[in-house]
């Protein structure tokens, strides 16, 4: 099991990790205004959002691999509720830009993340796939 050195806890990927870069809580006047320029329902805007904000986030190649596999598994489930990941929670200290909780096709957003990650993370995914994951005890 992969251990995150920052927390010392097991690294357990979640699809929400792809969305953290779009959290505008306490950044409405900076990141929020920046993201308002994009329409996540428009395929070209969606691609730019993913390439500019989502995929470049600092992660080890092993974290990328596990996160990618988590997304692959969710996409294989025809009933997975991707929209629930965007739902506004008034109790949480996080929020997305206006309208994101009403995205027309959240599955398409995550399909695009998967498609682009396959290309952008290709070397990292290949490197991790050649390793024996049972030996992963630290983030590498």
Image: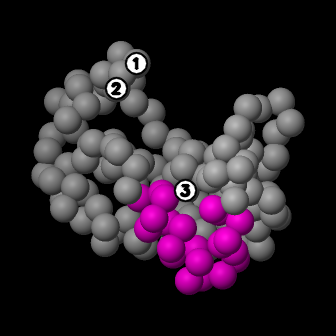
Q: Cβ–Cβ below 8 Å for labels 3 and 1?
A: no
Mark 3 vs mark 1, CA separation in Å: 26 Å
Magenta-tinted stretch: 34-55
The quadrant of the rendering that contains the C terminus is top left
Extreme residue toward the top, this view: 8
Q: Position of residue 78 (x, y in %)?
A: 63, 66
Can residue 64 be seen at all in this image of the molecule? yes
The mark nearer the N terminus, 3 or 1, is 1
Q: How is the image coloured?
A: one colour
Mark 2 element type: loop
- Identified at 24% across, 65% down, the residue is 122
Q: Which mark is residue 42?
A: none
Where is residue 3 drawn, in percent x and y?
31, 24
- Relative to 129, residue 110 above or below: below
Q: Which residue is mark 2?
A: 4
Does residue 92 sit above or below 130 in this rendering?
Answer: above
In front here: 117 or 74? Answer: 117
Quarter holding the N terminus is: top left
**Main secondary structure along the magenta-highlighted residues:** helix
Residue under the point 54% across and 49% down: 21
Give the CA distance from mark 3 to mark 2. Answer: 23 Å
For the residues marked 2 and 1, what is the alpha-carbon distance in whole angstroms? 6 Å
10 Å crowding of disc 2: few (<14), some (14-19), many (20+)? some
Q: Quadrant of residue 45?
A: bottom right
Relative to 38, is 100 above or below? above
Q: Is residue 84 left or right of residue 14?
A: right
Q: Which residue is mark 3?
A: 74
Residue reaching furthest to the right: 90
Which mark is drawn over residue 7?
Answer: 1
Circle 1: is it few (<14), some (14-19), or many (20+) Cα within 10 Å? few
């Amino acid at each position: 099991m992969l251990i995150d050195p920052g927390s010392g806890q097991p690294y357990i990927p979640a699809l929400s990790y792809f969305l953290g870069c779009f959290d505008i809580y306490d950044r409405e006047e900076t990141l929020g205004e920046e993201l308002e320029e994009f329409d996540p329902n428009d395929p070209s805007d969606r691609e730019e959002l993913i390439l500019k904000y989502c995929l470049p986030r600092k992660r080890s190649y092993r974290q990328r691999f596990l996160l990618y596999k988590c997304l692959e598994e969710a996409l294989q489930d025809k009933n997975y509720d991707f929209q629930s990941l965007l739902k506004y929670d008034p109790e949480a200290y996080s929020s997305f830009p206006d309208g994101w909780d009403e995205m027309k096709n959240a599955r398409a957003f995550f399909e695009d993340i998967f498609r682009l990650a396959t290309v952008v993370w290709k070397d990292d995914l290949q490197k991790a796939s050649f390793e024996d994951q049972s030996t992963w005890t630290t983030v590498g």
